Amino acid sequence: MDIDKQIVAEIEARIGAKNVRTGADAEGFLEDFWGRARGKTLCVALPASTQEVSEILSICFEHRIAVFPQGGNTSTCLGAVPDGSGRSIVLSLSRMNRILSIDPLDASITAEAGCILADIQNAAAGVDKFFPLSLGAEGSCQIGGNVSTNAGGTSVLRYGNTRDLVLGMEVVLPDGRIWDGMRTLRKNNTGYDLKHLFVGAEGSLGIITKVALKIFPSLGHLTSALISFEDIAHLTAFTEPLRRAFDTSIIAMELISGSEVRIVKTMMPDLNIPYDQNVGWFLLVDLVSDGQGDIADRLQEVLGDAMEGGQITDVLVSANEAQRAAIWKLRHSVTESHKKYGMGMSHDVAVPIGDIPRFIQAAKTKVDEAFPQADIAIVGHVGDGNLHYNVIFEQSRWDAISDQPQIRKNVYKAVYDIAADMNGTFSAEHGIGALHVAEMKTYKSDIELEMMKGIKALFDPHNIMNPGRVLPG
Amino acid sequence: MDIDKQIVAEIEARIGAKNVRTGADAEGFLEDFWGRARGKTLCVALPASTQEVSEILSICFEHRIAVFPQGGNTSTCLGAVPDGSGRSIVLSLSRMNRILSIDPLDASITAEAGCILADIQNAAAGVDKFFPLSLGAEGSCQIGGNVSTNAGGTSVLRYGNTRDLVLGMEVVLPDGRIWDGMRTLRKNNTGYDLKHLFVGAEGSLGIITKVALKIFPSLGHLTSALISFEDIAHLTAFTEPLRRAFDTSIIAMELISGSEVRIVKTMMPDLNIPYDQNVGWFLLVDLVSDGQGDIADRLQEVLGDAMEGGQITDVLVSANEAQRAAIWKLRHSVTESHKKYGMGMSHDVAVPIGDIPRFIQAAKTKVDEAFPQADIAIVGHVGDGNLHYNVIFEQSRWDAISDQPQIRKNVYKAVYDIAADMNGTFSAEHGIGALHVAEMKTYKSDIELEMMKGIKALFDPHNIMNPGRVLPG
């Protein structure tokens, strides 16, 4: 038996042959969710416990076999599928999907890493609490992946990134040892805070097997407001008064360009989106109303100056849950509309919050000049300084381009350079995966990369954990 | 010239002789603020810039001279003064005390590490913003120290620990290289989040020289409520409804035992504290009121069931700022009263929030049995699960104890063991310093210590940064 077959046999012996997939049975784990990449692997291992994860990693550590951890395989940046070497295993957490405990008095929930995000949201709701992490893939992404990638989503403004929701974790280190960091303490100043190293490390330092998370009081009545305005330069003129007046009552603050509305209306006419695509911009604001006073009145009052000054042109306030859902339908239909429209290059940038208008203006000047065939369509968590800045070529225009790979490269570089010039970032919430390793080299300082590589070598001396991801070689 | 003199001369050459203190001029930097410890040093260096810090560290790195960074020297756990070896320097950040920028639109402030905390609070207030970190030493502690120790304080419940307020930082590494991590981004998923390693590292991995911090909308009108109750077992029965009803409107939630009230009234009679020392417990709650509806009415409503059930006996609500200040005066007088009362052993423990009553009951049983001469006095940030659990011997009783060091040791161990049994911690917000290094060995797992030591060796291979602090040898 050759060594590779022996390794698979060893893993089968530890976790049971039916939990090790090879050949056609492994197919579903090899291809990226978005269909952009496809890898090879010796086998896909589906452990059922931390102990089994530990045993698998011990085997891989001994034989120097690469391990590609996989959660829900919803990574936007090729972080969840194996590379093409074939001398690797995929370790899927999907069988480790239990909620372990939920304690309303401690305001915490613990779960295995393979637990689906929506299941955690529901478990919290079941005890009249709220788990705020919310994103498009919540029905299939796994909490271990959310924590490993420090996922963002629509509630960051009030509740922070996933990092801010993590109280503790259990991690299997690359050599198979288990770190039990499953605490639910809000305060614990006893040495370096190791959990923050694993949050956002994208599985490159070890495999998170359990997490302890904060849960919060249930939200009261939510109201959505859709504010129309023409000139992006006016954005902060009315978002500042909103923040001052409503403070933590603001749950989400999302920017949507009129061009996005046009694309959604064109590509998904059945949705009957009622908003005018000729409006320059929309700001979608979600507010918790405390039931005291009419929120529409209070909004009008806060936005009064901006209304009078013509800086905003309209404010639509949801009167019931159906109207609120209708407003959010626009936001949630963006990704699918883009796919239908043509070839989109999405940039997940962040800049200092106050510089959002300046960034949008500078990027438009650059894109209009360098890529006149492209449309610009923007959605973004603007309250956090995070924009999904899309440069989209309508399909026939894209097909007419001869050197597509070069154009693609040029578009990305043009937009990232502008963000970098503003002390911004090329990856705000999506992470690095295999897709952005080159940008790490371009945009991170040498000393920063050196510190990261030192940490990687310390935790994963044989470079078996998610090799080729996160850090440049 | 011997080597030690040469090192001092080299430092003088770089930063100017008048900024290097030796002999009597160094005295003020050698003694712990609380008078518990006193160290020796070759000199105290007072650099004025990051570049100067870098040059000093390069010299110390080359000659393997220990560096003890010092901020406001307000550490509660001997983290800010040099050890007794004498082959070290103290590096005081106190001349690097400038606010560098404040940007209301970006909701950020940047400052040098030696900036006094109160100056940052004031700068934020100056642009109608709020910097929430608040603690007893705020008039003299420095922000670099706050960040290095991940300071807690009274606003953690709503705003988090210092860690949660940090957006970016600049650090001089032990070999003198400078890491510029001064960003103000809310989201930046580009590799390992290095700043979280330095937050709470107590200067053992490098010296933080600048920080970028979040600022927030100014707080509205504050109301304080003092809730009286007899049985600690009832605590969560009324704090849960409070949290559910007021959610992020709660800024602080502080527990004060009746025994604390007695000690404050006895030791500081001039304060004329009006609260009844025979009440078992007080819960001090700070609420931001939105100006809509009378907060006393809403409190009565929320606490109605607990009032009727006799779980709470009284609710006092501040009607104006003077009454609010009077309520907080009790809380703020605790530390000074303890000093006057006798020998106190303070435990900065945290346990899961819901376990606070169980912890208090278990600890009382143990302390009453093992140390019948002692009083128990408790204040704590109970909303975060953090208690300052004080075992105090009235002075004459303490003097009568023959083996004081052993009793002291036994008291600490008794209380920490109970916290540890509940998956709690022996240092919630105060950190480790030189004082709690032994507890690190006792209460942290081997694998955790090994990971921390690996990180320490990676960043500080010659162990020159704050040696003997944080980690056991």
Image (cartoon, coloured by chain):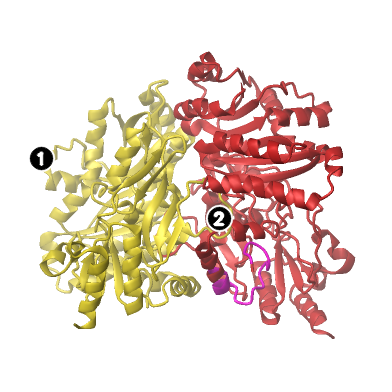
Chain colours: A yellow, B red
Residue at position x 25%, y 50% in the image: A137
Give whichever of B181, A120 is nearer the camera. Answer: A120
Residue A69, percent across and down? 30, 64
Q: Which residue is mark 1?
A: A270
Q: Classify the position of the N terminus of chain A by image quarter.
A: bottom left
Residue A383, percent across and down? 40, 45
- Whether residue B310 sits left or right of residue A347 in the image: it is right
Give whichever of B5, A124 is nearer the camera. Answer: A124
Circle 2 sits in a helix, a strand or a loop, which is it?
strand
Q: Which residue is mark 2?
A: B212
- Which amino acid type corresponds to the residue marked 1 in the rendered image? Asp
| Distance CA(mark 1)–CA(mark 2) | 47 Å
Question: In this picture, which residue range is highlighted in magenta?
Answer: B455-472
Residue A106, percent across and down? 47, 38
- Whether residue B335 sits left or right of residue B402 in the image: it is left
- Whether residue A348 sits left or right of residue B455 in the image: it is left
Tag shown at residue B130: none
What's the magenta bit mostly, secondary-structure-wise?
loop
Residue B315 within the magenta-colored segment of the rendering:
no
Residue at position x 20%, y 78% in the image: A5
For this orientation, the residue located farthest to the bottom is B1
Give whichever of A450, A255 is nearer the camera. Answer: A450
Residue B270, percent across and down? 83, 27
Compared to residue A401, the image places residue B361 above or below, namely above
Compared to residue B325, the image places residue A465 above or below, namely below
Residue at position x 68%, y 30% in the image: B328
**Do the residues marked 1 and 2 share a common chain?**
no
